Amino acid sequence: MTNQNAVKFGLPGLMISAFVLAFIPLFQKLAIRWNSGDNSYCYLIVPLFLYLCWEKKNDFHFGQFSWNLWGLVPVLFSILVMIAGELGSVETLLYIGIWGGFVGILFILYGLRLRHLLFPLLILSFLVPLPPFINKMLTFNLKLAASTLSVMLLRIAGVSVLQDGNIIDLGITQLQVVDACSGLRYFVPLILMALLFGYFYCRRLWQKGVLLAVVLPLSILVNGLRIFATGMLHMWGHPELAEDFFHDFSGWVVFMLAGAILFGVSLILRQTTKRSNEKENRLTVSNVQNGLQKPLAITVALCLLFAGSGYALQRLPSAANLPARTSFETFPMTIGGWHARRSYLSDEILNSLWADDYVSATYYHPGFPNTIYLLIPFYEYQGTRHTAHAPQSCMLGGGWALIGSREHTVNTESGQPLPLRTNIWEKGRTRILGSYFFFQRGRTIISPWRNKYWLMVDAFTRHRTDGALVRAEMTLAPGQSMAEAYKVLEEFVGRVYAVLPEFVPM
């Protein structure tokens, strides 16, 4: 290989290396998400992408580069998406930006030829884990559907069983279908398998659509069978066969079963279409850049762009102005006749809350049968993995079912209307009325997306991203009317709002 060829092939590697090194904190955050059980399939995505590209090596000519300047557009856009994701604390945008940046680099190298890699790039997009709120929503619904199916099968088998949400009462024991057994760990990998089987075995679009449509009922079916088998093992007096190694092994078995069924469906669909003897046209390579001046200029410009934007991305969230405030250590434990007992969160919860300061207390009132739990985490700055987030995902993750929700306005002592979102949660026979709002730099916001929008705006215009989330959750007393419960909670939250400005800067 001549020196010119060494430079020619070294420049793309230099660009990709600069991209990875500049945004290494983002890749570290991505690795944290991959390490969670539901996203472990992500480790297979890059090898799959490389294999799909390797299949096209004879036609695509990966060593011939176009150096198309239009590729700078998706690169710049992806960097803006990553900055918006960091400032708005939308972690998923960071990972979409990583994928988009890599696509932009490939567009620079290959130009319009990149359209022949659309399917490999689609598979590569699976490196982006599901957003947390979609993850929680799917987890809750999948485990509820699988629990219901398993209960039906147990009753068909003659077992007397009661179901309360995701809790299955067998009489001799209770089974709780936790998040890890929801079937989500099958669902996304099965979608990936359906796409791959469709790519290799199905020629028609409708066939690929059928494969994708099979995934949801199939994941519920195999997970329901697994829970059914677990219940039968308990009834037969062998609960140890449903724990530890055997529990994990059964999960692997049912996933392989689901994959085999999906593969069988793809083969059946393949038989419905006659195979064509026509050969695909070979890809014509044009606009190949042979000189070094343009590739070298683009590479240097991109390396500088990646270095500058990567540095800015690390500095922007923490380089904020924070007005003086009072610590939550002096937060009042008596509010409008409600008396509190302060509590402190465990290290595990604090690590997931990411707060710089917080108050956690349970309030009681001699004139009411309710107890109110108040949690206010405060953040000196907000970015991904260090931000206030709405309580829905936490409650769903804790096994609570959302049975009602409304947005309303509360009149406060100052006369300023306070917007609230109040949810009704249920678990077993316990009901909770939970209100929350974001108190962010003088704004009261109830929409998580509107909150993220103002985070981005204030980061640029005010150099501030500090703020707090106010959560007040009240247990409902037996026989208590919803109107009375709303009134009690609204009055309490209104009184809390009156003391907030001392602890959360406006």
Image (cartoon, helix red, strand yellow):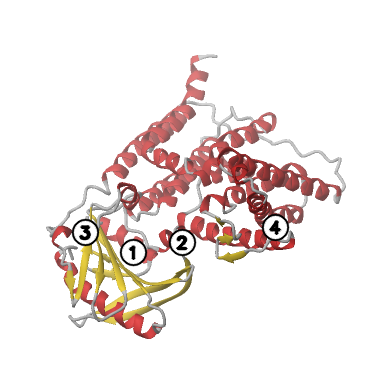
Question: Mark 2 is on which residue type?
Answer: Leu
N-terminal of the two: label 1 or label 2? 2
Residue 217 picture quarter: bottom right
Callouts 4 and 2 close, C-beta under 8 Å: no
Q: Which mark is residue 396?
A: 2
Question: Mark 3 is on which residue type?
Answer: Arg
Which part of the image, by quadrant, shows the N terminus? Answer: top right
Location of residue 281 with respect to 170 vertically, above or below: above
Kindly report which numbered mark, 1 or 4, lies closer to the viewer in this rendering.
Answer: 4
N-terminal of the two: label 1 or label 4? 4
Q: CA distance from mark 1 to mark 2?
A: 21 Å
Is residue 115 in view? no
Q: Which mark is residue 451?
A: 1
Q: CA distance from mark 3 to mark 4?
A: 48 Å
Left or right of residue 431: residue 270: right
Question: Mark 4 is on which residue type?
Answer: Ala
Question: Secondary structure under badge 2?
Answer: helix
Q: Which mark is residue 462?
A: 3
Identify the residue position indicated by label 4 in the image: 213
Q: Which is nearer the eye, 119 or 351? A: 351
